[in-house]
Amino acid sequence: MIKTKGLFHIGLPVNDPERAKKFYTEVLGMEFVSLQRDDMGDGLARVELRSGDDIVVLFERPTPVENDSFKEAGATHQAFIVDSDDFELASKKMGEWGVRIHHVPTVDRGAAGRGFYFFDTEGNLLQLYTPPK
């Protein structure tokens, strides 16, 4: 058995790296680290971001894909932890900011916390999670 020790990074596919970078930095408050091209020999962009102590990498798709992530990938998503104030802000403001909201936006799991579901600019299903108070 191989025992993993954690995540090196989360990689998300994107059609438009600049548009996605803007979403992740301006809406979700992630820190921009770097933009690279051709580091994997394909000439595609790779945008590295920081979310707390974690790294999120936006990988440009070789061929753009337009989809509704939930219909295409089911419940596959990435979940990011936020404090309760930012969770409340997201649930109130994301629609006003033009963010596409999932048809079941908020899930209350009682003692397990709450989740808010939405899509990024590239069709990826995301969740903001806040632990119970």
Image (spheres, helix red, strand yellow):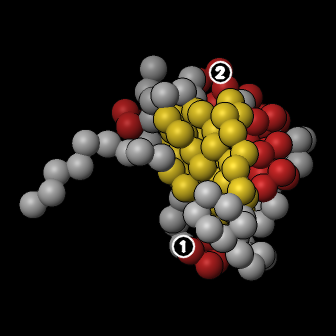
Q: Where residue 128 sits in the image (x, y, percent)?
A: 59, 41
What residue did someone put label 2 on? 85
Q: Residues within 10 Å of mark 2 (few under 14, many from 20)?
A: few
**How many badges with numbers are in the image?**
2
Report whether 27 appears left or right of 110: right
The residue shown at (53%, 39%) is 55
Residue 6 spot, x, y in % from top left = 32, 42
Q: From the viewer's perspective, is 97 left or right of 108?
A: right
Residue 104 visible, this orientation: no
Image coords of residue 125 (percent x, y): 63, 59
Circle 2: element type: helix
In the rendered view, tell whether residue 60 sits above or below residue 28.
below
Disc 2 residue type (three-letter): Asp
Frontmost residue, 103 versus 81: 81
Q: Is residue 123 above or below residue 106?
A: below
Q: Which mark is residue 74?
A: 1
Dot 1 amino acid type? Gly
Q: Nearer the viewer, residue 43 or 22?
A: 43
Left or right: 64, with 86 as reference point: right
**Mark 1 or mark 2, which has the lower sequence index?**
1
Say which element carries label 1. loop
Q: CA distance from mark 1 to mark 2?
A: 28 Å
Callout 1: 10 Å neighbours few (<14), some, many (20+)? few
Q: State which quarter of the image contains the N terminus.
A: bottom left
